[in-house]
Each structure stands twice: as C-alpha cells, then as structure tokens.
Amino acid sequence: CRRHTSGTRRSACHWIQAGLPTTPVPQPVLLQALFQQRIYRRMVGGPEPSADALTHMLSWLAEAARSTVAAGADLRPLVGPVSDPSTILTQVPPPPSPLLSFYREGEKRFGVPWEVVAAVNFIETKFGRVRSSSSAGAQGPMQFLPSTWATYGLGGDIHDSHDAIIGAANFLHASGAPADERRALFAYNRASAYVEPSCCTPAS
C-alpha cells in the first residue's frame, strides 16, 4: 500500500488488506467512490467537460474513464426524467462477497456468465442500492415485473437479492444466453443501448 501515493488507491488498498469484501467499507473509500460517481455523472452530461478532463488523466485511468462515460451517455436515454427525486428509495446494498456467490450460483445452474448477471444487477439497481419500483412497476434488485417474476422467479422473493439474481439468470437463459447473450439482454430490456452501447459496437 505504501507505493500508492493517491488517497483513493491507498484507502482502497488498506481496505483490501483488511479483508475485502467481508469487512465494512471504510468511510474514506465511500466518500472517494461518491466523488468519482459525481465526476462521471458530470462528464456524461456533455462532451466538452469530458474531453478536457480526460487529457489530465493518466493513460490507464483515461481509458477506463472514456469507456465509463461513453457507456453512461448511451444508457442515459433509457432513464426517464425524475420529477420528484424524493421518491427514489435507496439502501445499503449487500456486500460484494455474497453477491458474487449468487452470480456464480446463477452461472452454475443456468450457464449464464456471472459477469453478465452482475452487469444487469448493476445497471438495474446499482447492485441493489436502489429499492424503488420503476415507473413501469418493476420491482426488486433485478427489476422484475411481477408478471415476469411469476414465470421465472422459481417461487422466490422478488425483493431478495439471492432469489432475484437466480431468477434473472433463469430468465436470461430462457431468452437465449449463453449462446446468444445479446438476444437475452434485449429481452431483459428492449433497447439497443442496453445490449451493446456505441462505445463497444464493432466497426463495420
């Protein structure tokens, strides 16, 4: 950890050495993650600030930031304007360790790569941080409509992280994954940007 000079990397390094992900997230790491989230959100707002900020970053960080901002810009149109932010309910998400075990269980049962299920969990509710229902009535950490949950939820609790993640793996498998992950993701959310943002679209 001593070789890391920046506060962000040093704090994260000490957390990892303390037993990530079984230990609580230290306050400095939480604050640094919040600052980073706000920076990316600002960068997604327009190309001018993004281009200027990227020129001042280390090359490895600029590459990651560029991909994050491009993906955020593509996904932003999928979210409608929120007239009353107070209606958005949040909570402390489950620790990384149990979530990872749930993703891997979904992969083992249904063959859907755990990274795909994790990505859906992140996009839908930031790993369970958002607990509000969507404007369409989707619920839980994987944002299932109750009618869809009745088919793919395997009798579980739509609001339980484990049950919701396994249900999502079941749905993705029934929709074509792992053989056709794009088809499965499009079935989950019928928007082309949800499947393959322009940042990652292969050149023709």
Image (cartoon, grey):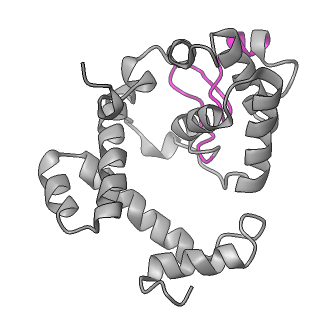
The residue nearer to you, when weighing 114 against 30, is 114
Task: Please identify the quarter of the rendering in which residue 176 is found.
Answer: top right
Position of residue 61 measured from the top left corner of the image (x, y, whole percent) = 35, 62
The answer to whether residue 27 shows anywhere in this view is no
Residue 145 in magenta? Answer: yes
Position of residue 104 measured from the top left corner of the image (x, y, whole percent) = 77, 38
Left or right: 9 as drawn, with respect to 150: left
Residue drawn at (67%, 52%), measured in percent from left and top?
93
- State the residue lying farthest toward the bottom: 2
Residue drawn at (69%, 12%), measured in percent from left and top?
148
**In the image, residue 45 above or below residue 185:** below
Residue drawn at (69%, 78%), measured in percent from left and top?
17
**In the image, residue 172 above or below residue 175:** below
Quarter of the image with the N terminus in it: bottom right
Quarter of the image with the C terminus in it: top left
Task: Please identify the quarter of the rendering in which residue 84 is found.
Answer: top left
Residue 45 in magenta? Answer: no
* Chief secondary structure of the magenta portion: loop
Left or right: 85 as drawn, with respect to 204: right
Task: Please identify the quarter of the rendering in which residue 161 is found.
Answer: top right
Left or right: 144 as drawn, with respect to 51: right
Residue drawn at (54%, 27%), measured in percent from left and top?
134
**What residue range appears in magenta?**
129-150
The residue nearer to you, when weighing 172 against 181, is 181
> Total number of numbered labels?
0
Position of residue 66 measured from the top left corner of the image (x, y, whole percent) = 29, 50
**In the image, residue 7 above or below residue 153:** below
